[in-house]
Amino acid sequence: MSAIAAKPAGNAGAFQPVASVIAIILAVIFIGAAYFLGNSGILAGGAMLPVTTLVGIIVGAALIAFGVHFVPVGGAPAAMGQSPGIATGVAMLATGAGLAGLFGGAWAASLGFGVALAGGAIGGGLMMAITCLMVNISYVYGMGIPAASGKVEKDPITGDSQAEYKSQGTEGHGLPFISYVGGVIGGLFGGLGGTLIYIELLEFYNASFSAANMEGFSSLAVGLAGIFAIGMFLVIAVLSAYNITGTIEGPHDPKFKRFPRAIIAAICASGICGLVALLAVAIL
Amino acid sequence: MSVKVEASHDGIPHNKVMAMGLVLALVSLYIAVAGSYAGYDYLAFFGGIAAVGALIWGNSTIKKLCSYGIGTGVPSAGMLAFGSGVIAMLFAAKLAAINPFIVPIAGLIIALIVGLILGWISNSVLNMKIPVMTRSIAELAAVGCLALMGLTVVAIGGLGFDQLTTYTIPILGLTVELYAFSYIATGIIAVSFMLGAIALQHPFNACLGPGEKQDRTNMLTIECGFLSMIVMAVISFAFIDMIAAWISLIIALIGWYWSYKKYFALSKRDAAAWLDAKPFSDAEE
């Protein structure tokens, strides 16, 4: 149904001020709830640890939602060479980049906060760089189509003109340079956000398991933080995909301007998901 | 954005499918939890039936949601369902410390709350303007939670946070509880996450189109559910009683074989023409 009915309506890009304000207020309420739960001793680590953890999760989610908009997503039309981008859905691409970064960051978690974040970002960026390169190789040498954007006259970075290379009846094809750069930037942000969520959750679980005197808890904390980070990453990635509604070429696409909505959605969604994730280790 | 493309008109209405799936999932989960509470693992296979029930419900919801053209493909709905479902399920598992019997219903309620907020976000903040969006995402979160609970029960026999986080082995006559080899710490929960998510998003994604028939799609859902259950039953050899694991595996294999045969017959029924190509038998002549 995705390819048949993907017709965005005229007002699909409009910003929703009332709903956005309500979403931000909800997120503040979730942070307040974390403060009171920590203060009353239900969550471990005192009043401030749950709050800083939840804020870290929300920042990570906002980074993911922002990063998803950079990734050139082509969907089914791209597989037929009729639109630019990588030939799969937003959710799959963002998940690939984000989880590659998350694993990279998780390996580096013992080396410190900064190293882990950098590892996560580079992991995600590397994954997207390799994907974009191989996609372009299969487009150019396998399908025999040049890379051309349909949304801009000239590539914003290299200044190459696009129209001569674009086939008639298509919206462009292949991966132009700006889309490649956008993909790598999207991978960097996705990996960074996913790793931030993971590390914040890991620190919180370590603190609450050591408060509960559980022996040998470190691998358990890793498993719990990992599955929660994956779940939250997927929720944020799919919500951002709903914001894009189908395909996007990269940072030069007009749809890119919709990203503030996705960030607000991510803040609210990660607020409720993060609060439930903190409550999963509540002291009952 | 509300361009509705009708899927199959025929068959059972969505609310009836939802009620049937919900009742099947909850009753099966409670039977399995009661068995675990009494100390027997032999009822763990009811978890697989719960997962199948939840998946049938979720498949009908996906069909309803995706008939509006969400523009991102059917698989994204499955991922969203399980992403929010796993969060609700682990919080509900923690509540087993109060009473193990509140876990399934608590998971359902928490997932519905999380799903309602996510659905409201996608409909209002992201301006999707799809009438069934809020309800569908809430339903999908509940489906993700129940299906994950079912697959978890197949693997480890219970739903309590203690069962999820410890692995009990006898050493020199003493039972030792280890965190490092548990369902969560080894990452097997991620396997069940993906098995469930694929079983949820695949059937409608495979059957959609002008000739989509409800009974054929549902049969594929059942087949995918039992296929996931086979893998979880194999994993369960590491966690639960050997005989219980064999019971789960045999039931999963029988269920899968039966539903696969039925699905094959239904595909033949709906196909315009059928040519049995026999790729290998004639190759030597």
Image (cartoon, coloured by chain):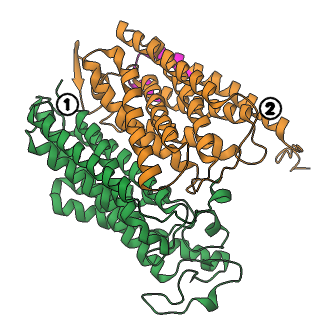
Determine the CA span between mark 1 and mark 2: 50 Å
The answer, for residue B190, to whether it is visible in the render is no
Residue A96 spot, x, y in % from top left? 44, 58
- Say which amino acid is labelled 1: Ala
**Range shown magenta:** B235-249
For label 2, count other residues whose C-alpha is less than 10 Å away and answer few (under 14), some (14-19) or many (20+): few
Q: Give whichever of A189, B23 is nearer the camera.
A: B23
Q: In this view, does B88 lie above or below A244?
A: above
* Foreground: disc 1 or disc 2: 1
The residue located at (63%, 92%) in the rendering is: A164
The color chain A is rendered in? green
> Chain B is which colour?
orange
Residue closer to the observer: A57 or B191: A57
Please report, as a chain letter, where disc 1 is located.
A
Q: In this view, does B106 lie to the left or right of B207?
A: left
Main secondary structure of the magenta stretch: helix
What percent of the width, then of the height, locates residue A207? 12, 39
Pointer 1 and pointer 2 on the same chain:
no
**Residue underneath mark 2:** B265
Q: In the image, is residue A184 above or below residue B77?
A: below
Residue A116: mark in rendering: none
Q: What residue type is labelled 2?
A: Ala
Name which residue lies at 70% across and 27% down. Answer: B12
Q: Is residue A240 magenta?
A: no
- Secondary structure of residue under mark 2: helix
Residue B61 figure quarter? top right
Residue extending farthest to the top is B38
Instruction: Specify whether B244 is left or right of A268.
Output: right
State the image coordinates of residue B209 (x, y, percent, origin top left): 73, 48
